Amino acid sequence: MSDAEQRLRPAAAPPGPPAELTLAQQRQLVQALVDGLGRGGKSPRHVETHISHVLLHEGHAYKIKKALSNSFLDQSTLALRRAACHEELRLNRRTEPQLYLGVVPITGTPDRPVLGGDGPPLELAVQMRAFDESGLWDRLAARGALRTEDVDALAARLADLHARAAVAPAGGWFGAPEQVRLSLRDSLRDLQAPADDAAWPGADDRQSLALLQCWEAERFLRLEPVLRQRLADGRVREGHGDLHLGNVAREGGRCLVFDGIEFNAAFRWIDVMSDAAFMAMDLLAHRLPGLAHRFVNAYLEHGGDYGGMRVLDYYLVHRALVRAKVARLRAAQAPGGTCDEARAAGHRYVQLAAQLAAPRPRALLITHGLSGSGKTTLTQGLLQTLGAVRVRSDVERKRLAGLAAEQHSRSLPGGGLYGPAAGAATYGRLLEAAAAVLEGGWPVILDATFLRHADRVAARQLAGRLGVPFAILHFTAAPAVLRQRVLQRAALASDASEADETVLWLQSQTQEPLRPDELPLVHAVRAESRPGAAPRADWAPVLARLGLASAPAAPAVPDPASATAAPARAAGQA
Protein backbone atom coordinates (compact mmCIF):
# COMPACT_ATOMS: atom_id res chain seq x y z
CA MET A 1 0.00 0.00 0.00
CA SER A 2 1.41 3.40 -1.04
CA ASP A 3 1.99 6.19 1.46
CA ALA A 4 -0.91 8.14 -0.07
CA GLU A 5 -3.26 5.17 0.29
CA GLN A 6 -2.08 4.67 3.86
CA ARG A 7 -2.85 8.32 4.68
CA LEU A 8 -6.35 8.08 3.15
CA ARG A 9 -7.31 4.90 5.04
CA PRO A 10 -9.68 5.68 7.95
CA ALA A 11 -8.16 5.31 11.41
CA ALA A 12 -9.34 2.29 13.43
CA ALA A 13 -12.16 3.20 15.76
CA PRO A 14 -11.28 3.03 19.46
CA PRO A 15 -12.79 0.07 21.27
CA GLY A 16 -16.31 0.89 22.34
CA PRO A 17 -18.18 -0.21 25.43
CA PRO A 18 -19.03 -3.90 25.66
CA ALA A 19 -22.29 -4.93 24.07
CA GLU A 20 -25.31 -5.35 26.35
CA LEU A 21 -25.50 -8.85 27.83
CA THR A 22 -28.48 -11.10 27.32
CA LEU A 23 -29.83 -13.25 30.13
CA ALA A 24 -28.12 -16.26 28.56
CA GLN A 25 -24.79 -14.44 28.42
CA GLN A 26 -25.21 -13.41 32.05
CA ARG A 27 -25.70 -17.05 33.03
CA GLN A 28 -22.57 -17.91 31.06
CA LEU A 29 -20.67 -15.14 32.85
CA VAL A 30 -21.87 -16.27 36.27
CA GLN A 31 -20.92 -19.88 35.63
CA ALA A 32 -17.48 -18.79 34.40
CA LEU A 33 -17.03 -16.76 37.60
CA VAL A 34 -18.00 -19.79 39.69
CA ASP A 35 -15.50 -21.95 37.81
CA GLY A 36 -12.73 -19.34 37.94
CA LEU A 37 -13.09 -18.46 41.62
CA GLY A 38 -13.26 -22.15 42.49
CA ARG A 39 -9.89 -22.96 40.94
CA GLY A 40 -8.01 -21.38 43.81
CA GLY A 41 -9.86 -23.24 46.54
CA LYS A 42 -13.45 -23.68 47.65
CA SER A 43 -16.02 -23.03 44.92
CA PRO A 44 -18.47 -20.18 45.45
CA ARG A 45 -22.06 -20.96 46.29
CA HIS A 46 -24.38 -19.72 43.54
CA VAL A 47 -27.95 -18.74 44.41
CA GLU A 48 -30.31 -17.63 41.66
CA THR A 49 -33.48 -15.69 42.39
CA HIS A 50 -36.03 -14.25 40.00
CA ILE A 51 -34.10 -10.96 39.70
CA SER A 52 -30.47 -11.68 40.67
CA HIS A 53 -27.52 -14.05 40.77
CA VAL A 54 -25.67 -14.18 44.09
CA LEU A 55 -22.21 -15.68 44.62
CA LEU A 56 -21.08 -16.41 48.19
CA HIS A 57 -17.32 -16.79 48.41
CA GLU A 58 -14.67 -16.42 51.13
CA GLY A 59 -16.71 -14.26 53.48
CA HIS A 60 -18.23 -12.06 50.80
CA ALA A 61 -21.37 -11.99 48.71
CA TYR A 62 -21.55 -10.66 45.16
CA LYS A 63 -24.98 -9.81 43.80
CA ILE A 64 -25.38 -9.48 40.03
CA LYS A 65 -28.68 -8.04 38.87
CA LYS A 66 -30.35 -9.87 36.01
CA ALA A 67 -30.76 -8.07 32.69
CA LEU A 68 -34.53 -8.05 32.65
CA SER A 69 -37.57 -5.82 32.73
CA ASN A 70 -41.02 -6.61 34.09
CA SER A 71 -44.03 -4.93 35.64
CA PHE A 72 -42.21 -3.81 38.78
CA LEU A 73 -38.58 -3.23 37.74
CA ASP A 74 -36.37 -2.37 34.79
CA GLN A 75 -32.71 -3.39 34.95
CA SER A 76 -32.46 -4.41 31.32
CA THR A 77 -29.37 -2.29 30.47
CA LEU A 78 -25.96 -2.00 32.08
CA ALA A 79 -26.60 1.68 32.79
CA LEU A 80 -29.82 0.83 34.65
CA ARG A 81 -28.09 -1.95 36.58
CA ARG A 82 -25.23 0.38 37.51
CA ALA A 83 -27.72 2.94 38.85
CA ALA A 84 -29.58 0.20 40.76
CA CYS A 85 -26.34 -1.09 42.31
CA HIS A 86 -25.40 2.35 43.59
CA GLU A 87 -28.96 2.95 44.78
CA GLU A 88 -28.89 -0.33 46.69
CA LEU A 89 -25.64 0.78 48.31
CA ARG A 90 -27.03 4.19 49.25
CA LEU A 91 -30.26 2.88 50.72
CA ASN A 92 -28.86 -0.02 52.70
CA ARG A 93 -25.88 1.87 54.06
CA ARG A 94 -28.46 3.87 56.03
CA THR A 95 -28.80 0.84 58.28
CA GLU A 96 -25.77 -1.39 57.59
CA PRO A 97 -22.79 0.55 56.23
CA GLN A 98 -20.39 -2.16 57.42
CA LEU A 99 -22.32 -4.81 55.46
CA TYR A 100 -22.53 -3.08 52.07
CA LEU A 101 -18.94 -2.72 50.88
CA GLY A 102 -19.19 -1.34 47.36
CA VAL A 103 -19.91 -1.89 43.68
CA VAL A 104 -17.38 -4.14 41.91
CA PRO A 105 -16.85 -4.11 38.11
CA ILE A 106 -16.73 -7.36 36.17
CA THR A 107 -14.54 -7.03 33.08
CA GLY A 108 -13.33 -9.37 30.34
CA THR A 109 -15.75 -11.47 28.32
CA PRO A 110 -18.75 -13.59 29.26
CA ASP A 111 -16.67 -16.78 29.00
CA ARG A 112 -13.59 -15.29 30.74
CA PRO A 113 -14.84 -12.66 33.21
CA VAL A 114 -12.61 -10.92 35.75
CA LEU A 115 -14.09 -9.83 39.06
CA GLY A 116 -12.73 -6.37 39.84
CA GLY A 117 -10.59 -6.23 36.71
CA ASP A 118 -9.45 -3.23 34.69
CA GLY A 119 -11.10 -1.94 31.56
CA PRO A 120 -14.68 -1.23 30.57
CA PRO A 121 -17.12 -3.10 32.82
CA LEU A 122 -19.02 -5.95 31.24
CA GLU A 123 -21.23 -6.28 34.31
CA LEU A 124 -21.41 -5.03 37.91
CA ALA A 125 -21.88 -6.65 41.29
CA VAL A 126 -22.83 -5.31 44.72
CA GLN A 127 -20.23 -6.59 47.16
CA MET A 128 -21.33 -7.38 50.70
CA ARG A 129 -19.82 -8.90 53.79
CA ALA A 130 -21.44 -12.28 54.36
CA PHE A 131 -22.74 -13.29 57.78
CA ASP A 132 -23.93 -16.42 59.57
CA GLU A 133 -27.27 -17.33 58.01
CA SER A 134 -28.40 -19.15 61.15
CA GLY A 135 -29.05 -15.70 62.62
CA LEU A 136 -31.71 -14.82 60.05
CA TRP A 137 -34.93 -14.07 61.86
CA ASP A 138 -37.04 -16.54 59.90
CA ARG A 139 -34.63 -19.29 60.97
CA LEU A 140 -34.63 -18.10 64.57
CA ALA A 141 -38.44 -18.09 64.52
CA ALA A 142 -38.52 -21.63 63.13
CA ARG A 143 -36.27 -22.76 66.02
CA GLY A 144 -38.28 -20.85 68.63
CA ALA A 145 -35.20 -18.72 69.27
CA LEU A 146 -36.46 -15.23 68.40
CA ARG A 147 -36.36 -13.14 71.60
CA THR A 148 -38.10 -10.10 73.01
CA GLU A 149 -34.84 -8.15 72.99
CA ASP A 150 -34.57 -8.83 69.24
CA VAL A 151 -37.89 -7.16 68.42
CA ASP A 152 -37.18 -4.32 70.86
CA ALA A 153 -33.89 -3.62 69.07
CA LEU A 154 -35.56 -3.71 65.64
CA ALA A 155 -38.32 -1.35 66.79
CA ALA A 156 -35.70 1.17 67.89
CA ARG A 157 -33.71 0.82 64.67
CA LEU A 158 -36.80 1.21 62.46
CA ALA A 159 -37.98 4.27 64.38
CA ASP A 160 -34.52 5.78 63.96
CA LEU A 161 -34.47 4.99 60.22
CA HIS A 162 -37.86 6.65 59.76
CA ALA A 163 -36.84 9.69 61.80
CA ARG A 164 -33.83 10.28 59.51
CA ALA A 165 -35.47 9.27 56.21
CA ALA A 166 -36.33 11.68 53.42
CA VAL A 167 -39.94 12.94 53.49
CA ALA A 168 -42.26 12.61 50.50
CA PRO A 169 -43.69 15.84 49.03
CA ALA A 170 -47.10 16.64 50.49
CA GLY A 171 -48.72 16.93 47.07
CA GLY A 172 -46.91 14.03 45.44
CA TRP A 173 -48.08 10.62 44.22
CA PHE A 174 -46.16 8.44 46.68
CA GLY A 175 -48.38 7.91 49.71
CA ALA A 176 -51.38 9.64 48.17
CA PRO A 177 -54.60 7.77 49.05
CA GLU A 178 -55.15 6.78 45.42
CA GLN A 179 -51.66 5.29 45.16
CA VAL A 180 -52.00 3.40 48.46
CA ARG A 181 -55.33 1.97 47.41
CA LEU A 182 -54.09 1.00 43.97
CA SER A 183 -51.47 -1.32 45.48
CA LEU A 184 -53.96 -3.20 47.64
CA ARG A 185 -56.60 -3.46 44.93
CA ASP A 186 -54.00 -4.75 42.45
CA SER A 187 -53.17 -7.56 44.87
CA LEU A 188 -56.85 -8.44 45.26
CA ARG A 189 -57.33 -8.46 41.49
CA ASP A 190 -54.28 -10.62 40.84
CA LEU A 191 -55.21 -13.11 43.54
CA GLN A 192 -58.78 -13.43 42.28
CA ALA A 193 -57.66 -14.16 38.70
CA PRO A 194 -57.79 -17.90 37.89
CA ALA A 195 -54.42 -19.62 37.66
CA ASP A 196 -53.37 -21.65 34.63
CA ASP A 197 -53.82 -24.92 36.51
CA ALA A 198 -57.26 -23.86 37.84
CA ALA A 199 -56.15 -24.86 41.36
CA TRP A 200 -56.09 -21.26 42.58
CA PRO A 201 -57.94 -19.70 44.14
CA GLY A 202 -59.93 -22.39 45.97
CA ALA A 203 -63.53 -21.88 47.05
CA ASP A 204 -62.66 -20.66 50.56
CA ASP A 205 -60.05 -18.25 49.19
CA ARG A 206 -62.51 -16.88 46.65
CA GLN A 207 -64.95 -16.22 49.45
CA SER A 208 -62.28 -14.59 51.64
CA LEU A 209 -61.04 -12.42 48.77
CA ALA A 210 -64.58 -11.29 47.95
CA LEU A 211 -65.12 -10.33 51.60
CA LEU A 212 -61.79 -8.53 51.64
CA GLN A 213 -62.80 -6.57 48.55
CA CYS A 214 -65.94 -5.36 50.34
CA TRP A 215 -63.94 -4.61 53.49
CA GLU A 216 -61.39 -2.60 51.52
CA ALA A 217 -64.07 -0.47 49.85
CA GLU A 218 -65.69 0.38 53.18
CA ARG A 219 -62.41 0.88 55.03
CA PHE A 220 -60.87 3.11 52.37
CA LEU A 221 -63.91 5.38 52.39
CA ARG A 222 -63.18 6.19 56.03
CA LEU A 223 -59.41 6.21 55.70
CA GLU A 224 -59.01 8.45 52.66
CA PRO A 225 -58.87 11.74 54.61
CA VAL A 226 -56.61 10.09 57.21
CA LEU A 227 -54.17 8.91 54.54
CA ARG A 228 -54.17 12.32 52.91
CA GLN A 229 -53.46 14.00 56.23
CA ARG A 230 -50.63 11.59 57.00
CA LEU A 231 -49.00 12.49 53.68
CA ALA A 232 -49.35 16.18 54.51
CA ASP A 233 -47.92 15.56 57.99
CA GLY A 234 -44.75 13.98 56.63
CA ARG A 235 -45.57 10.38 57.58
CA VAL A 236 -44.73 9.11 54.08
CA ARG A 237 -40.98 8.60 53.86
CA GLU A 238 -38.25 6.72 52.05
CA GLY A 239 -38.39 3.59 54.15
CA HIS A 240 -37.15 0.02 53.86
CA GLY A 241 -40.00 -1.42 51.82
CA ASP A 242 -39.44 -5.15 52.40
CA LEU A 243 -39.15 -5.61 56.15
CA HIS A 244 -40.00 -9.27 56.72
CA LEU A 245 -38.22 -11.84 58.88
CA GLY A 246 -35.94 -12.92 56.04
CA ASN A 247 -34.39 -9.45 55.80
CA VAL A 248 -33.38 -9.11 59.45
CA ALA A 249 -30.68 -11.04 61.27
CA ARG A 250 -29.05 -11.31 64.69
CA GLU A 251 -25.28 -11.00 64.65
CA GLY A 252 -23.07 -10.57 67.68
CA GLY A 253 -25.92 -9.36 69.86
CA ARG A 254 -27.09 -6.70 67.42
CA CYS A 255 -29.88 -6.50 64.88
CA LEU A 256 -28.97 -6.34 61.17
CA VAL A 257 -31.53 -4.71 58.85
CA PHE A 258 -30.71 -5.18 55.18
CA ASP A 259 -32.08 -5.66 51.67
CA GLY A 260 -34.24 -2.56 51.47
CA ILE A 261 -35.88 -2.16 48.07
CA GLU A 262 -33.91 -0.22 45.49
CA PHE A 263 -35.55 -1.37 42.26
CA ASN A 264 -38.92 0.37 42.62
CA ALA A 265 -39.28 3.73 44.36
CA ALA A 266 -43.01 3.23 44.95
CA PHE A 267 -42.24 0.17 47.08
CA ARG A 268 -40.12 2.15 49.57
CA TRP A 269 -41.68 5.64 49.51
CA ILE A 270 -44.44 4.57 51.85
CA ASP A 271 -46.28 5.45 55.02
CA VAL A 272 -43.98 4.55 57.90
CA MET A 273 -46.75 2.36 59.34
CA SER A 274 -46.61 0.23 56.19
CA ASP A 275 -42.98 -0.62 56.99
CA ALA A 276 -43.90 -1.49 60.59
CA ALA A 277 -46.97 -3.43 59.43
CA PHE A 278 -44.88 -5.73 57.22
CA MET A 279 -42.82 -6.95 60.18
CA ALA A 280 -45.86 -7.22 62.46
CA MET A 281 -47.75 -9.21 59.82
CA ASP A 282 -44.82 -11.57 59.28
CA LEU A 283 -44.44 -12.18 63.02
CA LEU A 284 -48.15 -13.03 63.12
CA ALA A 285 -47.68 -15.32 60.12
CA HIS A 286 -44.95 -17.15 62.03
CA ARG A 287 -47.33 -17.66 64.98
CA LEU A 288 -45.62 -15.10 67.19
CA PRO A 289 -48.52 -12.75 68.11
CA GLY A 290 -46.94 -11.66 71.40
CA LEU A 291 -43.78 -10.53 69.62
CA ALA A 292 -45.84 -8.87 66.87
CA HIS A 293 -47.77 -6.77 69.39
CA ARG A 294 -44.62 -6.03 71.37
CA PHE A 295 -42.90 -4.83 68.19
CA VAL A 296 -45.72 -2.47 67.20
CA ASN A 297 -45.94 -1.06 70.71
CA ALA A 298 -42.17 -0.56 71.00
CA TYR A 299 -42.04 1.12 67.57
CA LEU A 300 -44.80 3.54 68.57
CA GLU A 301 -43.16 4.26 71.92
CA HIS A 302 -39.92 5.19 70.17
CA GLY A 303 -41.47 7.33 67.45
CA GLY A 304 -44.73 8.54 69.00
CA ASP A 305 -46.81 7.99 65.85
CA TYR A 306 -49.94 6.74 67.63
CA GLY A 307 -52.04 8.29 64.89
CA GLY A 308 -50.65 5.55 62.65
CA MET A 309 -52.87 3.04 64.45
CA ARG A 310 -55.77 4.44 62.43
CA VAL A 311 -54.26 2.90 59.29
CA LEU A 312 -52.41 -0.14 60.68
CA ASP A 313 -55.08 -2.71 59.84
CA TYR A 314 -55.22 -1.53 56.21
CA TYR A 315 -51.47 -1.99 55.84
CA LEU A 316 -51.48 -5.33 57.67
CA VAL A 317 -54.00 -6.68 55.17
CA HIS A 318 -52.06 -5.17 52.27
CA ARG A 319 -48.82 -6.83 53.38
CA ALA A 320 -50.47 -10.24 53.85
CA LEU A 321 -51.96 -10.05 50.36
CA VAL A 322 -48.58 -9.10 48.88
CA ARG A 323 -47.05 -12.22 50.43
CA ALA A 324 -49.97 -14.29 49.13
CA LYS A 325 -49.30 -12.94 45.65
CA VAL A 326 -45.58 -13.74 45.93
CA ALA A 327 -46.45 -17.29 47.02
CA ARG A 328 -48.74 -17.64 44.03
CA LEU A 329 -45.97 -16.50 41.67
CA ARG A 330 -43.64 -19.06 43.23
CA ALA A 331 -46.26 -21.75 42.80
CA ALA A 332 -46.49 -20.93 39.09
CA GLN A 333 -42.71 -21.23 38.68
CA ALA A 334 -41.91 -24.09 41.06
CA PRO A 335 -41.98 -27.79 40.25
CA GLY A 336 -43.91 -30.57 41.99
CA GLY A 337 -43.99 -30.55 45.77
CA THR A 338 -42.51 -27.09 46.02
CA CYS A 339 -45.43 -25.80 43.96
CA ASP A 340 -47.88 -27.40 46.41
CA GLU A 341 -46.07 -25.81 49.36
CA ALA A 342 -46.13 -22.38 47.72
CA ARG A 343 -49.83 -22.72 46.93
CA ALA A 344 -50.54 -23.72 50.54
CA ALA A 345 -48.57 -20.70 51.78
CA GLY A 346 -50.60 -18.44 49.50
CA HIS A 347 -53.81 -19.88 50.95
CA ARG A 348 -52.64 -19.26 54.51
CA TYR A 349 -51.66 -15.65 53.75
CA VAL A 350 -55.11 -15.01 52.28
CA GLN A 351 -56.69 -16.44 55.41
CA LEU A 352 -54.36 -14.31 57.55
CA ALA A 353 -55.46 -11.21 55.62
CA ALA A 354 -59.09 -12.11 56.27
CA GLN A 355 -58.35 -12.56 59.97
CA LEU A 356 -56.54 -9.21 60.14
CA ALA A 357 -59.55 -7.48 58.57
CA ALA A 358 -61.96 -8.90 61.16
CA PRO A 359 -63.18 -6.52 63.89
CA ARG A 360 -61.26 -6.65 67.17
CA PRO A 361 -62.65 -5.97 70.65
CA ARG A 362 -61.71 -2.48 71.84
CA ALA A 363 -61.29 -1.16 75.36
CA LEU A 364 -59.71 1.73 77.21
CA LEU A 365 -57.76 0.59 80.26
CA ILE A 366 -55.99 2.98 82.60
CA THR A 367 -53.50 2.14 85.31
CA HIS A 368 -53.73 3.52 88.83
CA GLY A 369 -51.01 3.46 91.46
CA LEU A 370 -47.93 5.07 92.90
CA SER A 371 -44.57 5.04 91.16
CA GLY A 372 -42.89 1.66 91.54
CA SER A 373 -46.13 -0.29 91.93
CA GLY A 374 -45.47 -2.36 88.79
CA LYS A 375 -47.69 -0.64 86.24
CA THR A 376 -45.24 -0.70 83.30
CA THR A 377 -43.69 -4.08 84.15
CA LEU A 378 -46.96 -5.95 84.48
CA THR A 379 -48.91 -4.32 81.63
CA GLN A 380 -46.22 -5.50 79.19
CA GLY A 381 -47.72 -8.97 79.42
CA LEU A 382 -51.23 -7.57 79.00
CA LEU A 383 -50.47 -5.67 75.81
CA GLN A 384 -48.80 -8.74 74.29
CA THR A 385 -51.73 -10.98 75.28
CA LEU A 386 -54.48 -8.60 74.21
CA GLY A 387 -52.84 -7.02 71.18
CA ALA A 388 -53.14 -3.61 72.80
CA VAL A 389 -51.10 -0.45 72.49
CA ARG A 390 -49.73 1.07 75.69
CA VAL A 391 -49.06 4.81 76.01
CA ARG A 392 -46.71 5.75 78.87
CA SER A 393 -46.98 9.13 80.57
CA ASP A 394 -43.26 9.05 81.45
CA VAL A 395 -42.35 8.79 77.77
CA GLU A 396 -44.93 11.24 76.41
CA ARG A 397 -44.04 13.84 79.05
CA LYS A 398 -40.45 13.80 77.78
CA ARG A 399 -41.56 13.80 74.13
CA LEU A 400 -43.67 16.93 74.65
CA ALA A 401 -40.59 18.63 76.09
CA GLY A 402 -38.38 17.57 73.19
CA LEU A 403 -36.38 15.15 75.35
CA ALA A 404 -35.41 11.54 74.71
CA ALA A 405 -37.21 9.04 76.91
CA GLU A 406 -34.19 8.31 79.11
CA GLN A 407 -32.90 11.90 79.17
CA HIS A 408 -33.23 13.43 82.64
CA SER A 409 -35.13 16.72 82.75
CA ARG A 410 -33.50 17.93 86.01
CA SER A 411 -36.97 18.98 87.13
CA LEU A 412 -37.59 19.42 90.84
CA PRO A 413 -40.43 17.36 92.38
CA GLY A 414 -43.68 19.14 91.61
CA GLY A 415 -42.02 21.57 89.19
CA GLY A 416 -40.73 21.73 85.63
CA LEU A 417 -41.96 18.73 83.67
CA TYR A 418 -43.81 17.59 86.77
CA GLY A 419 -45.64 20.84 87.45
CA PRO A 420 -49.39 21.35 86.90
CA ALA A 421 -49.12 22.73 83.34
CA ALA A 422 -46.84 19.94 82.10
CA GLY A 423 -49.01 17.37 83.87
CA ALA A 424 -52.17 18.64 82.16
CA ALA A 425 -50.44 18.60 78.76
CA THR A 426 -49.19 15.05 79.38
CA TYR A 427 -52.60 13.67 80.28
CA GLY A 428 -54.08 15.51 77.30
CA ARG A 429 -51.51 13.79 75.09
CA LEU A 430 -52.46 10.40 76.56
CA LEU A 431 -56.12 10.92 75.70
CA GLU A 432 -55.26 12.11 72.19
CA ALA A 433 -53.17 9.00 71.57
CA ALA A 434 -55.84 6.75 73.08
CA ALA A 435 -58.50 8.19 70.77
CA ALA A 436 -56.34 7.46 67.71
CA VAL A 437 -55.70 3.87 68.79
CA LEU A 438 -59.37 3.22 69.59
CA GLU A 439 -60.56 4.82 66.35
CA GLY A 440 -58.20 2.48 64.51
CA GLY A 441 -60.00 -0.45 66.11
CA TRP A 442 -57.46 -1.47 68.77
CA PRO A 443 -57.51 -1.69 72.58
CA VAL A 444 -55.33 0.78 74.47
CA ILE A 445 -53.66 0.95 77.89
CA LEU A 446 -52.81 4.34 79.39
CA ASP A 447 -49.85 3.82 81.72
CA ALA A 448 -49.79 6.65 84.26
CA THR A 449 -50.40 7.09 87.98
CA PHE A 450 -53.90 8.57 87.43
CA LEU A 451 -53.87 9.75 91.04
CA ARG A 452 -56.15 12.74 90.27
CA HIS A 453 -59.87 12.05 90.06
CA ALA A 454 -60.32 14.55 87.21
CA ASP A 455 -57.83 12.65 85.02
CA ARG A 456 -59.68 9.39 85.62
CA VAL A 457 -63.00 11.05 84.78
CA ALA A 458 -61.60 12.42 81.50
CA ALA A 459 -60.45 8.95 80.44
CA ARG A 460 -63.79 7.42 81.41
CA GLN A 461 -65.63 10.07 79.39
CA LEU A 462 -63.48 9.33 76.32
CA ALA A 463 -64.38 5.65 76.57
CA GLY A 464 -68.05 6.62 76.82
CA ARG A 465 -67.90 8.87 73.76
CA LEU A 466 -66.27 6.12 71.68
CA GLY A 467 -68.54 3.39 73.06
CA VAL A 468 -65.81 1.11 74.40
CA PRO A 469 -65.44 -0.73 77.72
CA PHE A 470 -63.44 1.04 80.45
CA ALA A 471 -61.49 -0.33 83.39
CA ILE A 472 -59.11 0.93 86.07
CA LEU A 473 -56.16 -1.38 86.69
CA HIS A 474 -55.22 -0.78 90.32
CA PHE A 475 -51.61 -1.50 91.36
CA THR A 476 -50.31 -1.61 94.92
CA ALA A 477 -47.13 -2.62 96.74
CA ALA A 478 -45.79 -2.27 100.25
CA PRO A 479 -44.11 1.10 101.00
CA ALA A 480 -40.72 -0.56 101.46
CA VAL A 481 -41.06 -2.31 98.10
CA LEU A 482 -42.07 0.93 96.33
CA ARG A 483 -39.05 2.70 97.83
CA GLN A 484 -36.68 -0.08 96.81
CA ARG A 485 -37.98 -0.11 93.25
CA VAL A 486 -37.73 3.63 92.63
CA LEU A 487 -34.22 3.74 94.09
CA GLN A 488 -33.10 0.82 91.95
CA ARG A 489 -34.63 2.33 88.82
CA ALA A 490 -33.02 5.71 89.48
CA ALA A 491 -29.63 4.06 89.99
CA LEU A 492 -29.85 2.26 86.66
CA ALA A 493 -30.91 5.46 84.82
CA SER A 494 -32.36 3.31 82.04
CA ASP A 495 -36.03 4.25 82.22
CA ALA A 496 -38.12 7.29 81.33
CA SER A 497 -39.41 7.61 84.90
CA GLU A 498 -37.67 10.17 87.13
CA ALA A 499 -39.53 9.19 90.31
CA ASP A 500 -37.43 9.10 93.48
CA GLU A 501 -38.18 8.93 97.22
CA THR A 502 -39.32 12.55 97.32
CA VAL A 503 -41.69 12.06 94.38
CA LEU A 504 -43.04 8.91 95.98
CA TRP A 505 -43.74 10.76 99.22
CA LEU A 506 -45.46 13.62 97.39
CA GLN A 507 -47.66 11.17 95.49
CA SER A 508 -48.71 9.44 98.70
CA GLN A 509 -49.68 12.78 100.25
CA THR A 510 -51.57 14.25 97.30
CA GLN A 511 -53.30 11.24 95.70
CA GLU A 512 -57.08 11.41 95.43
CA PRO A 513 -58.61 8.07 96.49
CA LEU A 514 -60.85 6.09 94.20
CA ARG A 515 -64.47 7.10 94.71
CA PRO A 516 -67.42 4.78 95.23
CA ASP A 517 -68.70 5.19 91.67
CA GLU A 518 -65.28 4.12 90.36
CA LEU A 519 -64.98 0.95 92.41
CA PRO A 520 -67.08 -1.23 90.05
CA LEU A 521 -64.58 -0.37 87.31
CA VAL A 522 -61.51 -1.32 89.35
CA HIS A 523 -59.48 -4.48 88.81
CA ALA A 524 -56.86 -5.04 91.51
CA VAL A 525 -53.71 -6.34 89.85
CA ARG A 526 -51.69 -8.91 91.76
CA ALA A 527 -48.22 -9.89 90.66
CA GLU A 528 -47.18 -13.52 90.51
CA SER A 529 -43.49 -14.10 91.13
CA ARG A 530 -41.57 -17.24 90.31
CA PRO A 531 -37.88 -17.87 90.95
CA GLY A 532 -35.78 -16.79 87.99
CA ALA A 533 -38.75 -15.27 86.10
CA ALA A 534 -39.99 -11.73 85.70
CA PRO A 535 -43.13 -10.82 87.68
CA ARG A 536 -46.36 -11.33 85.81
CA ALA A 537 -50.08 -10.91 86.42
CA ASP A 538 -53.07 -13.08 85.65
CA TRP A 539 -55.11 -10.98 83.26
CA ALA A 540 -57.82 -13.55 82.54
CA PRO A 541 -60.34 -12.14 85.09
CA VAL A 542 -60.26 -8.56 83.74
CA LEU A 543 -60.36 -9.78 80.11
CA ALA A 544 -63.37 -11.97 80.87
CA ARG A 545 -65.13 -9.18 82.76
CA LEU A 546 -64.70 -6.79 79.84
CA GLY A 547 -65.64 -9.37 77.23
CA LEU A 548 -62.16 -9.27 75.76
CA ALA A 549 -60.29 -12.28 74.44
CA SER A 550 -56.56 -12.63 74.06
CA ALA A 551 -55.35 -11.98 70.53
CA PRO A 552 -55.82 -15.15 68.43
CA ALA A 553 -52.80 -16.82 66.89
CA ALA A 554 -52.51 -16.40 63.14
CA PRO A 555 -52.29 -19.40 60.82
CA ALA A 556 -48.66 -20.45 60.48
CA VAL A 557 -47.22 -19.53 57.11
CA PRO A 558 -43.85 -21.19 56.51
CA ASP A 559 -41.96 -19.79 53.54
CA PRO A 560 -41.74 -22.57 50.96
CA ALA A 561 -38.66 -20.96 49.49
CA SER A 562 -36.84 -20.40 52.79
CA ALA A 563 -34.38 -23.25 52.35
CA THR A 564 -33.19 -22.07 48.96
CA ALA A 565 -33.63 -18.33 49.37
CA ALA A 566 -31.77 -17.91 52.66
CA PRO A 567 -28.30 -17.58 51.12
CA ALA A 568 -29.62 -14.89 48.82
CA ARG A 569 -31.18 -13.05 51.73
CA ALA A 570 -27.90 -13.28 53.60
CA ALA A 571 -26.39 -11.55 50.60
CA GLY A 572 -28.98 -8.80 50.71
CA GLN A 573 -31.20 -10.12 47.91
CA ALA A 574 -34.71 -8.72 47.55
Image (tube, rainbow, N blue to C red):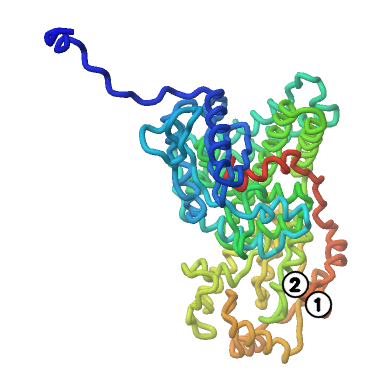
Q: Is residue 431 above or below residue 93?
A: below
Percent across and percent down for residue 544 are: 87, 61
Three-letter amino acid code at the position of disc 1: Ala
Q: Are marks 1 and 2 in contact (CB under 8 Å)?
A: yes
Percent across and percent down for residue 412 are: 50, 85
Please indicate whether residue 18 sits to the left or right of residue 193 in the image: left
In the image, farthest residue toward the front: 1
Three-letter amino acid code at the position of disc 2: Leu
Q: Which mark is residue 378?
A: 2
Q: Residues within 10 Å of mark 1 (few under 14, many from 20)?
A: some
Residue at the spot of label 1: 527
Element assignment for label 1? strand
Can the viewer see residue 564 in this picture? yes
In the image, farthest residue toward the left: 4
Residue 377 falls in image quadrant: bottom right
Foreground pick, 69 / 563:
563
Residue 503 falls in image quadrant: bottom right
**Looking at the image, which residue is at 48% across and 78% down?**
409
Foreground pick, 277 / 83:
83
Foreground pick, 382 / 566:
566
Q: Residues within 10 Å of mark 2 (few under 14, many from 20)?
A: many
**Looking at the image, which residue is at 76% across and 39% down?**
560
On the rendered image, what quadrant is the C terminus found in? top right
Percent across and percent down for residue 7 are: 14, 12
Residue 30 falls in image quadrant: top right
On the rendered image, what quadrant is the N terminus found in? top left
